[in-house]
Amino acid sequence: MPRWSLGCQACRQRRIGCDAAIPTCRQCLLGNRWCSGPIQGPIILDETRAVMTRHQGTSKPSTRSKTLAMSSQPSPKVFISMALVSHFIYFIATRNQGPSNRPWLHELGDVSRGEARPTLDLALQAAATAFCGVNSKNYTVLMEACQLYGQALSRYISAMSRPSEEPTVSKICTSALLSLFEAIWPTNSVSYFVHLTACWKMLASMGTEPEHIAILRQVAVHVQHQSLFAVTAAPRSHRDSILDECNWAGLPWFQADNYQPVVDRLVVELFGLQKVLSRNHSRDDAIASYTVISSRINNLWVEYQAEQGQWGAPIEFSSHSSHQYPDAFTAFTMAYFSAAWILLSCVRLSVVDCPDTDPGREINSQRVLNCFSYLSQKRRGWIYLRMCAPLTIVALQSPSSEQRALAYTILDSSFYRAIFTGLSSSALWRIQTVQSACQNC
């Protein structure tokens, strides 16, 4: 016989001890609940389900039912794959400021199921397996990751080659995940940039009110930051292609975000500065672009100072011979402002013909290095992923040889080499190319 009690109904439902006091038991009195009082009369116990379960357990199942029951159990490989994906998402996902607290990688389960869903799952498994493979230096795991990547890429190319197919959220997320795989474990020197460009083109072709707009906005922010690194470190042909294609003002659903963090809007201005530095503009056009972009960056800085001032904490302060920040996102934002000021100084020097007496480039380069020193203590993947662009800008544009060497050393460090081999290789290739060109001049 099962255990039974004369306690009140509320205590029985909660499975807590009841003193059966009248008119209100002690538990209901403490919980400020209505008490039904102790049960009066006989207690009826329905044991039908328990008896049937015991009866079914004693009967011998057929061989066919045993086979079906065993085949429905997931294999250990499924659990390992789920663990790898979970670890990868936790490490790489960005803790964004804004209306959505869940990063886009966490939202992939909400993407509608369809023909493109298996490809998305394969791309996610490939990126997660590659991450765990490089982290553990296990080449067997890396080979499996490459096989998953090949399967995902084959399905992706087949789907994109159909003329009637339109871009979907699944395909956009798949392209972003394929670029993450290339950032972690590159198959060649340009695939990372090709995936980013394809992802941008699909984002640009979405309607004014696309489905899963919250996910698309976060994917667009990811592509935006990685495209900034691409125009900083990519070969000239791909750099020009990205600068031509990426027009963030042409995404009405992206610009309509009611709360877009300052750093995301700042990236658009960094694109503009890179375009001025990379193209042969006339002097008047370059000065006009410089004036407009400089004004926008100053306005963003004023807005950011006012925003941070509401919390009453300084943006940056020194403690025990190191620079500290209120949180990781503040340090990350300061690194991007410093990178913007470095590029403004470069444009002013190369276009406006100002003498190189402005100490701003060296000061801001040091600030980027300070921000990275603070952020590196957090050991989160999104920090290393998004700090590639400011560090590469310091390595290319700082007037101090010590600062350039330190930025190069960071990008060539064991962590970057171990986790983001593709990004590290692209940045180092670009820096070495510029240094060789300068030596030959």
Image: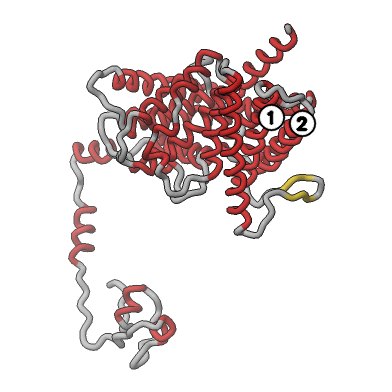
Rendered position, 202 above or below 371: above
Q: Which numbered tag is attached to residue 358?
A: 2
Q: Closest to the observer: 106 or 434? A: 434
Q: Is residue 239 visible?
A: yes
Q: Position of residue 409 (x, y in %)?
A: 72, 26
Q: Position of residue 422 (x, y in %)?
A: 56, 22
Crowd around label 1: few <14 · some 14–19 · many ≥20 (10 Å) = many
The structure residue drawn at horizontal position 29% and vertical position 72%, both measured from the top left corner, is 2
Q: Amino acid at mark 1?
A: Ser
Q: Closest to the observer: 163 or 362? A: 362
Residues at circles 1 and 2 in contact by the CB criterion of under 8 Å: yes
Rendered position, 376 above or below 7: above
Q: Quadrant of residue 311?
A: bottom right
The residue lying furthest to the top in this view is 440
Q: Position of residue 31 (x, y in %)?
A: 41, 81
* Relative to 100, 337 lies left or right: right
Q: Quadrant of the N terminus?
A: bottom left
* Relative to 388, 152 lies left or right: left
